[in-house]
């Protein structure tokens, strides 16, 4: 992972690096021709949120750092370069969710007819606890990162501050509720008529793609 960050030093953020390492064939990656890199798909059996957690742990340990600017990217620090050069052993402090099982892609269970079941979420009238929300945001770290990247891009284009596009709370609600229509988006705090027209068509495309790739259907939450 450090070798990959070193190779693309300061070029990609967490989201794109996690997609690259897990071999996601996204248009934004393929347009950069990174599929020819030795690092593309190097962690193919990992889930993207697991890669994101390792990247955060490397940052917490001071081995990588985030560059400034509207589009934050990752680079090696002096400590990271030294560790990589000397091939020193490394122990990272990771969240319990990442320790609990070895990195692997989960296959949805099959029903009696052999069809893969779609993941469903609790009905909207069931309240979501803070712990459940935190866990779900961790599971959807890839989506949240993509939404942040979209916010940064639109802020640059409109010469705005990022929170003028969407606040962090609004991004969290989008990632938690996974709205499928403009009507559902309008129920989220911070999304008024102007933002519905200006931003939500692209945001809904991002969310629908995430739903499709992760076999999520049904109600919000």
Image (cartoon, rainbow, N blue to C red):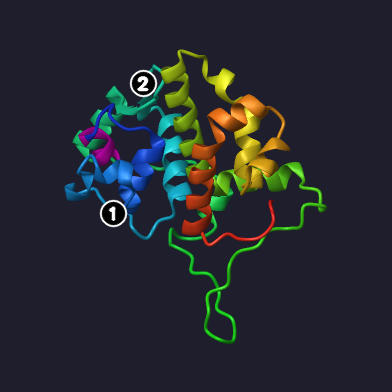
Q: Distance between the residues labelled 1 and 2?
A: 24 Å
Foreground residue, 14 or 154? 154
Q: Residue at x 34, y 40 (%)?
A: 17
Q: Residue at x 22, y 44 (%)?
A: 34
Which image quarter is the N terminus in? Answer: top left
Circle 1 packing at 10 Å, graded few (<14), some (14-19), many (20+), is some
x then y, percent, for residue 76: 29, 28
Q: Is the magenta stretch mostly helix, strand or loop?
A: helix
Disc 1: which residue:
41
**Does residue 51 appear to the left or right of 183 in the view shown?**
left
Q: Residue at x 43, y 49 (%)?
A: 48
Question: Is 206 in the magenta?
Answer: no
**Does residue 107 appear to the left or right of 127 in the view shown?**
left
Q: Can residue 60 be seen in this view?
A: yes
Residue 13 to residue 113: above or below: above
x then y, percent, for residue 69: 39, 17
Disc 2: which residue:
67
Dot 1 or dot 2, earlier in sequence = 1
x then y, percent, for residue 135: 63, 47
The residue range painted magenta reads 1-7
Q: Is residue 89 visible?
A: no
Q: Which residue is drawn at 46% across and 38% down?
A: 146
């Amino acid at each position: 992972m450090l070798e990959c960050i070193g190779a693309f030093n300061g070029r990609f953020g967490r989201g794109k690096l996690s997609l690259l390492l897990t071999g996601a064939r996204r248009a934004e990656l393929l347009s950069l021709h990174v599929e020819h890199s030795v690092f593309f798909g190097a962690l193919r059996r990992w889930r993207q949120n697991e890669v994101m957690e390792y990247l955060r742990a490397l940052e917490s340990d001071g081995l990588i750092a985030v560059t400034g600017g509207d589009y934050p990217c990752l680079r090696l620090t002096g400590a990271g370069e030294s560790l990589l050069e000397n091939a020193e052993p490394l122990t990272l402090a990771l969240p319990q969710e990442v320790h609990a099982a070895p990195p692997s892609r989960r296959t949805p269970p099959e029903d009696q007819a052999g069809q893969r079941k779609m993941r469903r979420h609790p009905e909207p009238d069931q309240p979501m606890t803070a712990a459940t929300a935190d866990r779900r945001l961790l599971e959807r770290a890839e989506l949240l990162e993509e939404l942040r990247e979209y916010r940064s891009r639109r802020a640059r284009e409109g010469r705005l501050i990022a929170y003028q596009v969407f606040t962090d709370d609004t991004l969290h609600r989008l990632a938690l509720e996974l709205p499928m229509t403009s009507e559902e988006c309008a129920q989220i705090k911070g999304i008024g008529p102007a933002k519905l027209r200006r931003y939500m068509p692209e945001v809904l495309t991002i969310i629908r793609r995430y739903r499709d790739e992760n076999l999520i259907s049904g109600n919000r939450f």
